[in-house]
Amino acid sequence: MKKAIIVGATSGIGKNLAKILLNNNYKVGITGRRLSILNEMKKKYDNCFISCFDITNFDKVEDELDNLSKQLGGLDLLVICAGINYDKDYKNKSDLRFDLEKKIIDTNISGFVCVSNWAFNYFKKQKYGHLLGISSISGIRGNKQIPSYSASKAFQINYLEALRQKSSIYKKIIITDIRPGFVNTKMAKNKQFWKSSVKTAANQIFVAIKNKKQIEYITKRWFIIALILKSLPWRIYDLLRKK
Ligand SMILES: NC(=O)c1ccc[n+]([C@@H]2O[C@H](COP(=O)([O-])OP(=O)(O)OC[C@H]3O[C@@H](n4cnc5c(N)ncnc54)[C@H](OP(=O)(O)O)[C@@H]3O)[C@@H](O)[C@H]2O)c1
């Protein structure tokens, strides 16, 4: 049985991916802050192990992941799904509030780095393993409506690329960057454009895992949007964003 940990598997993409792995003969360790949901999953699947922790409690992350990997009896794959965007707190879109910006930075940047460092070092020691992060199409350019979120996703894209370079001497360490457009979870509830179902997204991620992909857009047509966004001169991009 392959062994995987999904950090942030109590809802959305992570929970759906966990179900796919659990039904495909993986032993899976799932994490999140909501213990009741973790317990529900554990009750349903014999091959499911749980750990309840917040990735912004940086002092606890390593111990929690050490314990979970021991319970699994090893580790082949670690997926980082944990991430947040602004919630309803941001009533006035012209506001800029450091408390809300920091919350996103703590989770999507510092928490992400903390978990990915643990995984990278674990895989480096055993000389194989697969680390998969879920960034976003939002990381391609800055976005005035979600400044810290778009910047944090740009960070994740670059960080995963750097880890891929770092791991190139270890032929059997794979680093995957999944870049979704809109997926029908709580996070994208107000979005209508090219929104994929969470099941489709999780299935595509599973295929990307099996094919050891380095970068994958979810759904694939978001690749075209990414290309356009990347190549737009900033003056034109700014003009479009002024609306
Ligand atoms: N949905 C989209 O359209 C979309 C598009 C592009 C990228 N993404 C990215 O995909 C990833 C998953 O998003 P989703 O749509 O599936 O959202 P979601 O349903 O809100 O799931 C987020 C997961 O992250 C966990 N989490 C959040 N903060 C955490 C923390 N501090 N410590 C530990 N776990 C934490 C949550 O668990 P608890 O609440 O139990 O802690 C939950 O399991 C995110 O990184 C998101 O940015 C989503």
Image (spheres, grey):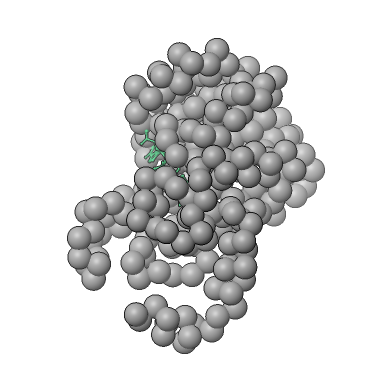
Residue 24 shows in this picture: yes
Give the side of residue 210 with respect to residue 188, left or right.
Answer: right
Residue 119, percent from left and from top: 58, 36
Residue 70 shows in this picture: no
Residue 171, percent from left and from top: 79, 43
User: Residue 150 versus residue 120: which sits nearer the camera?
Assistant: 150
Residue 12, percent from left and from top: 45, 39
Vertical relation: 63 (above or below) 102: above
Farthest-out residue, right: 171
Residue appearing at x 69%, y 35% in the figure: 129
Residue appearing at x 64%, y 33% in the figure: 77
Give the side of residue 51 with respect to residue 29, left or right.
Answer: left
Q: Quarter of the image for the C terminus: give it.
A: bottom left
Q: Quarter of the image for the N terminus: give it.
A: top right
In which image quadrant can residue 205 be found?
A: top right
Residue appearing at x 55%, y 12% in the figure: 46
Vertical relation: 1 (above or below) 31: above
